[in-house]
Amino acid sequence: MIPHPLALVLYERILPGSQLVNRLQDLNYRVECLAEPGRLVECAEQLRPMVVLADLEPAQKGVCAALAQLKQHAATKHLPIIAFGAEPTPGLETEAQQAGVNLVVSDTAVLNHLPQLLERALHLE
């Protein structure tokens, strides 16, 4: 039996984080949650997810820096990243894109259009 794909979700805010986890599980993804950006590369290397979803809102916590490290690390640089935030500001969106994020969307978009966003992110590579 083929295991369900794994999504690694980095979030601190309960909403939309928990809603996103539920939506991913509804789409038959296994989900690993992470609250500490500093552990992102280590977890991604060990768990080998198919996709990474990251909440940009705790911007002061170094989320974009952790995403950049993920994209610079040989074992994880191939991973597609979908980043989301309440309403990503142009500056935060630019910082996320410079870090290597494939898609930057709002909380509402990630929850309402998750299947399409996953398909898009997984086909970008």
Image: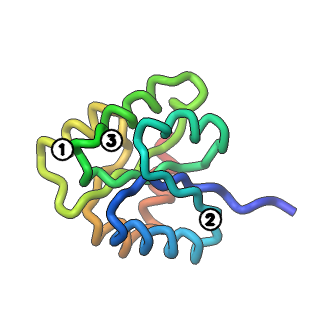
Instruction: Determine whether 12 is above or below 45 in the image.
Output: below
Asked whether the residues under the numbered discs 3 and 1 touch, taking CB atoms below 8 Å apart as contact, a structural biologist would say no
Q: Secondary structure at mark 1?
A: helix
Instruction: Count residues near mark 2 (Cα–Cα under 10 Å), then give few for <14, some for 14-19, many for 20+.
Output: some
Q: Quadrant of residue 92?
A: top left
Residue named by callout 2: 29
Disc 3 residue type?
Val
Label at residue 50:
none
Do the numbered discs 2 and 1 sit on residues whose CB atoms are within 8 Å? Answer: no
**Farthest left residue in view:** 90
Q: Nearer the viewer, mark 3 or mark 2?
A: 3
Rendered location of residue 15, percent (x, y): 33, 72
State how the image is colored: rainbow
The residues tagged by marks 3 and 1 sit, at their Cα atoms, a distance apart of 10 Å
Coordinates of residue 36 in the picture (x, y in percent): 42, 45
Q: Quick one: label 3 or label 1, which is nearer the N terminus?
A: 3
| Marks 3 and 2, how far apart at CA | 23 Å
- The numbered mark, 2 or 1, whose residue comes first in the sequence reads 2
Q: Position of residue 38 (x, y in %)?
A: 43, 36
- The amino acid marked with disc number 1 is Leu
Which residue is labeled 1 in the image?
92
On residue 63, the disc is: 3
Indicate the secondary structure of the residue bearing disc 3.
helix
